[in-house]
Amino acid sequence: MTRLQPTAVYVHIPFCPSKCGYCDFNSFAMSGDIVERTARAIEAEIRRSPHAGTPAKTIFFGGGTPTFIPADSLAAILHAVLEVHPPIEGCEITSEANPGTVDSEKFKRMRIAGFNRLSIGAQSFHDDELLRLDRVHSAKETRSAVCAARDAGFENINLDLMFALPEHSRSRWRRSLESAIELDPAHLSLYCLTLEPNTRFAKLAQRGELMLPSEDEQVTFFEDASCIAEAAGYRQYEISNYARPGFECRHNLCYWRCEEYIAYGPGAVQRVGNARWTHIKHPVAYCDAVEHGADLACERETLSEAQLRLERIMLGIRTTEGLRADDCDVNREGAEKCEAKGWIAIEDGRIALTAMGRNFCNQVALELC
Ligand code: SF4
């Protein structure tokens, strides 16, 4: 199974200090022995990988909250990844970080271990909003986390922010974004809050106890995001992502280009060739399976060419580079319709969203399929 083609590698750390009201990620508010046991199990899974020897193009630790676990555990897991997947020159090695779980010392140890990029979950620069989202940190702690990261030698820093929060106003969103930009991160991820089933927020909304902005207001927040970020020198290279030149997230670009990815850890999803599978999600069941050498998959699927084509279109159209019409065999009639509406531009066989089209990304994707 070893391939020479460098591949993106993902590691899922499934723990968080507490569960945020809007979150449907595979994350658990657990502590104690299970944390250390899971870290050891992830390391063991990596060391017995059938893909050992495949070079790493990018490495990404996500979650959950990777920085919830001790720096030594993160370093041990990364060490295993680097041994099993020799990194290519300039390999981007990212960890997500929650400002409430980090300090200078932890960042320094992570930098020494080999991480060279941080994605910090700021979400808002208003403390009342952070409280409402169940975040465990304040805006001041986000600012301190960015300083600590720079102190530790991280230059490539992303800040995550969310808009269209409950009762969110345009002026508050603009202030949050401007506060983020004042910290001069290399990258900004600006997401619209979405209601996911089975979350605390979804239950509140069902009872009519959560006032979320309308779709029109969401479009205004999104347009404000583009204007403010681009005026500050960030280029929008994907619907929700902005970067200083050269700081686009290479790991996420692999996903949007529909490339393969190898994954480890509870709940992590991997796709190699047309085989996609999901790891057992609960940390205890995952550890049991690793320790007994059992199958780690809880779901497996074989993607047809038609499914892969759909994914290439749905993901590729999100990026500014767009997609090659021929590679994806797009629906020509649908493309002409979108072009006539001014939603896409077609140039040298490449299809990309226009500024107006970014507001209709999902509709465009459906037309092209
Ligand atoms: S910190 Fe992130 S992963 Fe953890 S519960 Fe909150 S949103 Fe979910």
Image: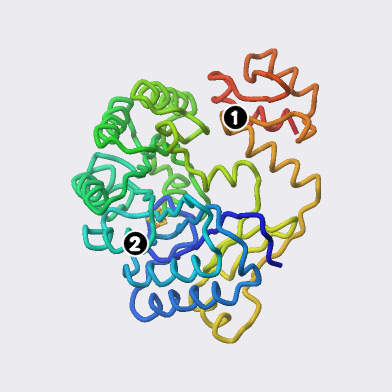
Give amino acid for label 2: Thr
Picture quarter containing residue 30? Answer: bottom left
Q: In the rendered structure, are the residues bearing label 1 and label 2 in contact, judged by CB atoms less than 8 Å apart? A: no
**Is 121 left, or right, of 4 in this rendering?**
left
In the rendered image, the vertical position of residue 100 relative to residue 50, given as above or below:
above
Quadrant in the picture for the C terminus: top right
Ligand 1 visible in quadrant:
bottom left
Q: Nearer the viewer, residue 73 or 360?
A: 73
Identify which residue is drawn at 27% across, 53% down. 99
Instruction: State which tag comes first along the sequence, 1 or 2.
Output: 2
Residue in the foreground of this view, choosing between 230 and 248: 248
**Left or right, residue 26 beside residue 21:** right
Q: Is residue 267 above or below residue 328?
A: below
Question: Is the C-beta of the residue carrying label 1 under 8 Å from the nearest atom of ligand 1?
Answer: no
Tag 1: residue type? Glu
Considering every residue shown, the one lying at the far front of the view is 89
**Image location of residue 91, percent across then percent down:** 49, 52
Up/down of 128 relative to 18, above or below: above
Q: Is residue 315 visible?
A: yes
Rendered residue at 27%/55% (across/down): 136
**Which residue: 66% across, 63% down?**
277
Q: Residue at x 46, y 36 (%)?
A: 241
Which one is nearer the viewer's eye here, 142 or 9? 9
Within-10-Å neighbours for mark 2: few <14, some 14–19, many 20+: many
Instruction: Find disc 1 in the rendering and name its residue.
Output: 321
x and y, in percent, of residue 35 in the image: 39, 75
